[in-house]
Amino acid sequence: MVPAALSTPIHPYSPAPPAAPAAMPSKTGSAPVVGGRDEGLRRDVGLVALLFTGVGAIIGSGWLFGAFYAAKETGPAAVVSWSLGAVMILFIALSYAELGAMFPVSGGVVRYPHFGFGGFASYTAGWVNWLAAASVAPIEVEAALQYATNYLHWLTRSVGGIKVLAPGGYAVAVVLMAIFVIVNFYGVKWFAKLNTVIVWWKLLIISLAVAALLAVKLIPHRLVDAGSAAPLGWHDLLSHGGFAPLGWHGVFSAIATTGIVFSYLGFRQGIELAGESQNPHRAVPIAVIGSVLLCGLIYVLLQVAFLGALPGSSLVHGWAKLEFQGDFGPLAGIAKILGLSWLAALLYFDAVVSPADTGLIYTTATARLSYAMAKNGNAPEGLAKLNKHGVPWLSLALAFVVGLIFFLPFPGWQELVGFITSASVLSFGSGPLVMGALRRELPDQARPFKVPFGDVIPFLAFASSNLVVYWTGWDINWKLFVAMGLGFVLLGFQHLSNGVRAGDDRVRGFSFVLLGVRRPVEGRLMDYDWKAGSWVFPWLIGLALISYLGGFGHGRNLLEFGSGAAAVVVFSLVIYAWAMIVRLPAREVRKYLGEELHETPEPVPDQGP
């Protein structure tokens, strides 16, 4: 779900002559599940390109702010938060690595739930995935504008100590969002050639930042003047409430709300681009797992370097009120204080390059989700129509409009990051369930990469997703669950008001733009597979209830820290078992696999722009 490969230029929607599918063995039915490839999509993405795609998507704005906000939330224990966040995301990534290697289809995060649980579960996953992806480009714009405040002070303002867009910032944000769409609208082949350079640039800058800040710690007398600008000693860092000033509550809250999990979410790009990978059975697991491990190591080192370089005056009021001059762009601000003006200049420049790269990637990602949902039957066919440049222009237009809407309730980076984190991990929750279901229904399906330990890893992945949602807190989660409810209301409204006439392949009505009703098949109305998806509503309602009763984000605090986490784990086990019981039978799985993996795309441009 990226705009292009890194080593070889491609177009994400461009067709190619269909290849003959290869059969995969299965003894659970009379015919094997065939292929696992999207016919008509080009396969130009190599292993290194796929790995760098994930790394490029992961290294966005998160690293520019995450170390600062994590330190404010939990002090030196932020290092633990980054490490635990990486482990939890790795559990999720392992589940998708198995699915991605087994069925390398484009838009896989959306399409996999349909394989295991049918129409309604697929719609739910598609809706929350789309919400999460559509909100990434706006937060990358906010990140760039917040750093740019160093030069253009009218871009942002401070409200309650939080930086948010000022009126002038809103105007610039609209322009930047429009640029993302325009680049995608006319095709991004030129960006493919540049993307490798951009990823190397990202790795270079973050490595320089880590090295320079660590050097300040090790040899401060050579790099900075004495006084309040000198870095704190390790003992001084622990003198303001100890290693974890807010205890484990702060450690886990930081994972969800300070940009830590957000900073790892780009691993999904290896899954979304699986359908265009040259050797997906080998490349997808390496790209997905490798991107998380590589970036996890970099992020932990960056947090250590950031803590070690904090100036002495920054902790006068404790960790919760950590502040220093220029902290609207924290890494560059510290670099300037410590006399590293060259590093500050590079960071201010990178604060435009890195978010712009990720924002462009996710603008394409959002359109790709709409495209995949349309091919999956979970959105109107119009969202899959291509213009003369081979781009789904309606999907791009929709992503632009919805992206602008996100600026209204979430006008600042820190405000939006929690919503994206909660929505993204909620959308990932269905993947481990699909993994468990397909292991039961297609036990002999070829699995080029198989995660060991049976149900242990998928359950830990599912529980991790739910825990991150819980730690995000009620003040953010209520907005997410309202958005989820809106999707179901739209689905019900469309079904009741317009319906789907048997034998009519046209679906009308504006509300269907974001809905999940499949086209009628053989004169029948859509089968939502209600039984197979019967766990969805209890899952969402239960998570919302636990979040409301919990002690994170202004919940009622009726569940204490330990009992709240235990409730989430037990609840996760119940939903996991429920989903395994009601999963689709093998014949339905094979039917959906046949429909979804081997639909021949119709890449002929429509008459749109």
Image (spheres, grey):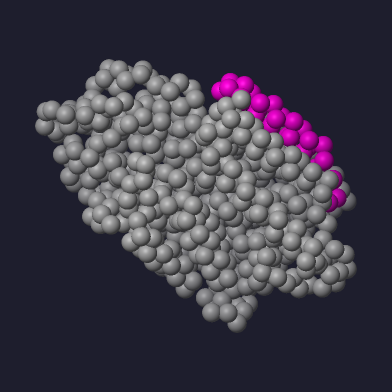
Instruction: Classify the position of the N terminus by image quarter.
Output: bottom right
Q: Quadrant of residue 306?
A: top left
Quick check: 312 left or right of 518? left
Question: As rendered, which of 30 and 557 lies closer to the eye?
Answer: 557
| 96 w.r.t. 565: above or below | below
Residue 1 on the magenta segment: no
Instruction: Classify the position of the C terminus by image quarter.
Output: bottom right
- Residue 564 visible in the displayed image: yes
Can you give x and y, in whole percent of width and height, for residue 51 in the image? 48, 48
Q: Residue at x 82, y 61 (%)?
A: 526
| 144 w.r.t. 322: above or below | below
Can you give x and y, in whole percent of width and height, for residue 106 in the image? 61, 57
Q: Residue at x 55, y 51 (%)?
A: 132
Q: Residue at x 62, y 30 (%)?
A: 549
Quick check: 278 left or right of 324? right
The residue range painted magenta reads: 559-588
Main SS type for the magenta part?
A: helix
Question: As rendered, which of 148 and 216 lies closer to the eye?
Answer: 148
